[in-house]
Image: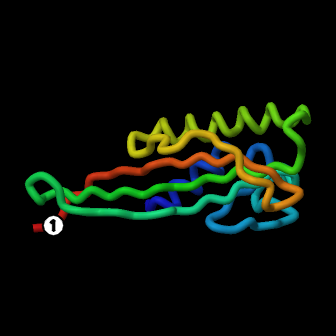
Amino acid sequence: MGVRQTVQSKLDKVLLPYGILSHHIRRVEVDKISGSTVKVNQDEYVVYRVVSSKGGAHGDGRAQIVRYYVDVNYYYAYEKTDARFADAENRIKRIIAEFKSDKHFCVANGESDIYDIDNPYRGINVEFLYVEAVKRGG
């Protein structure tokens, strides 16, 4: 499974039970989640992107290190004083825990606020680093 598919799987595991959709690079709006009876949460969504990829031969030249930075933006359509914000914060902590439970991921940059650029949504950003050693042929 590729990095994008791994990220999507992790986000779906944490967010879909709450009707929160996530997607690569852009917001996807739907009325219903396929194969689920959970109502879509229109007040929250997540957009992620693979920011960069760097690779290279290291050590004896037989392993290649693959690194990806993954930017995760969690958007919500209410004030921080709203009671729902506590639930959003808990989901963000669950996202971080889910990524950290995978030996390939670590937190590159912790939680930080996103400017109010997508009104009426505000957001929180977390950046992860994915690292993997891949054996080369020959």
Q: Residue at x 29, y 63 (%)?
A: 55
Q: Where's the N terminus, which quadrant?
A: bottom left
User: Is residue 84 placed above or below 125 in the rendered structure?
Assistant: above
Q: Colour scheme in the image?
A: rainbow
Determine which residue is flagged by label 1.
Answer: 137
Residue 133: give x, y in percent of width and height.
27, 52
Q: Is residue 2 above or below residue 115?
A: below
Look at 89% across and 34% down and name the residue there.
81
Mark 1, other Cα within 10 Å: few <14 / some 14–19 / many ≥20: few
- Direction front: furthest residue: 115
Q: Amino acid at mark 1?
A: Gly
Q: Secondary structure at mark 1?
A: loop
Which of these two is toward me, 115 or 24?
Answer: 115
Q: Quadrant of residue 78?
A: top right
Residue 33 appears left or right of 103: right
* Residue 120 in sight here: yes
The answer to whether residue 15 shows anywhere in this view is no
* Quadrant (top left, top right, bottom left, bottom right) of the C terminus: bottom left
Q: Residue at x 56, y 34 (%)?
A: 97
- Residue 123 rendering spot, x and y as whole percentages: 75, 49
In the rendered image, residue 53, in percent from the top left (x then y), is placed at 40, 64
